[in-house]
Image (cartoon, coloured by chain):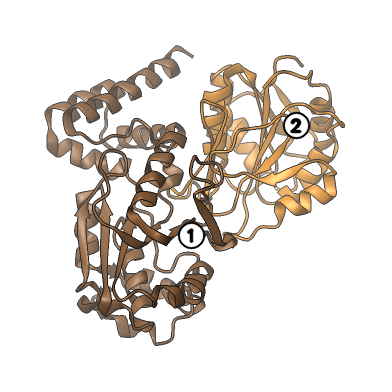
Amino acid sequence: MNGVRAVVIGASAGGVAALFEVLGALPQGFAQPVLCVLHLPDDRHSQLAEVLQRRVNRPVREARDKERIEAGQIYVAAPGYHLSVERDLSLSLSQEAPVHFSRPAIDFLFASAADAYCEGLLGVLLTGANEDGAEGLAYIKKCGGRTVVQDPRDAQVALMPEAALALHCPDHILSLSGIGQLLATLEPSAC
Amino acid sequence: MTSERNTDIEIRLLIEAIYLKYSYDFRDYSGASIKRRILHALRQFDCRTVTALQERVLHDPGMFMQLLQYLTIPVSEMFRDPGHFLALREEVVPLLRTWPSLKIWIAGCSTGEEVYSMAILLREEGLLERTIIYATDINPSSLEKAKQGIYSMQSLREYEENYRKAGGRRDFSEYYTAAYGNAIMDSSLRDNVTFADHSLATDSVFSETQLVSCRNVLIYFNKDLQDRALGLFHESLCHRGFLFLGSKESVDFSAYSDRFEPLVRPERIYRKT
């Protein structure tokens, strides 16, 4: 797949294991930045970045306000704050009301990243028991980007992928291993 | 694709129109969040396009005041990030005691939760009587709520645990009087508080201070405006004054990174170098 400059991933219930599998499948030298929103309890001291980094053996850190997005870096949203991508390809945090009871909201990351990367964005929506992410994924498609939904039969909780499929027809419906394989085929592209 | 592009153009025009007509400057706010808030307002006001909203806002100041409630984010709580208030109490208060009188600026005070948190902390440390607190915000409705000090009992019950974790020494209910599901804060907490309209985007420094608290405000600004605000704080703070930021804010990526040093870094308390 050519022309993908960044990847955004959203997940909720069952998402930690799903992220282990998808991010763990990324090849060394994977050039695109990967931005993830995983719904977590709002305890504000999430260890997700450390846990992921140990598990997938790639650079992972919690996204910080106003930092520039770097190639090959995996970012995870901080609990209690929405994560957005700005037009200048920096990150921003905000505390608007939760969306679908969630802050960070997958919809906010997806829509802002679609505005920033347009057709250069790949959006991936994984397992979850919530409708967050469906609208954002449809918006990525509308802006010319590409979309992937985890096959509901493969998802630990099918509601989130099903909500996405009810709103738009994605480019791919894949199992976790299929998503890993797809990401591994991405051509390096300047971000 | 075209309609998305049009929306972006319209949003820039709306923000420019607001600045020209009402002198509220949102031009250097972070774009993603301001776009969401404008689109949210659009649905609430039943406008088909941002241009339609702009026409109403431009010709009706009342409409602008309604829109302002969407453009500003009145999300706040008392003793938010209690560990940070505990650090303020343990690390900063002993140093604040060395000044005979204190001035504290709470910038972007919204509906007042940060103001009452600070006033309660200072009272328990015996400093409130010799302190003047300037509480500023750009939203007159928020300032009015802050002055009234009326909050729902439900939210105050949630703040009680924060207060305890922040090192609170008394029964939190001593600070308010409850009635009909609401509670009014003890008015003596705001005897030395001056509430004022002030914009970090367009106004300048108005007083020398020993402590500036500005929490979860800078995240809504782009880098240039963050630098402007930090410049105001730096100018306002006395020699070795303190800066208290929100839990995900820092001076690290700013033009002022070498003019503030972290006093307790995880708790986002900085000191002027």
Q: Which chain is drawn using orange?
A: A
Query: Residue visible at 68% across and 51% down?
Result: A13
Taking the spot 34% from the left edge, 30% from the top edge, the residue there is B27
Mark 2 → mark 1, Cα distance in angstroms: 35 Å
Q: Which mark is residue B199?
A: none
Q: Nearer the viewer, residue B162 or B225?
A: B225
Q: Is residue A157 above or below residue B31?
A: below
Name the amino acid, label 2: Gly
Mark 2 — on which chain does it sit?
A
The residue that label 1 is drawn on is B271
Residue ID for mark 2: A72
SS of the residue under disc 2: loop
Residue B262 is at least partly visible in this image:
yes
Location of residue A41 (image quadrant): bottom right
Q: Which chain is tinted brown?
A: B
- Secondary structure under the numbered disc 1 in the rendered image: strand
Which residue of the protein is positioned furthest toward the top in this rendering?
Answer: B2
Identify the chain of the residue marked 1, using the numbered disc in the image.
Answer: B
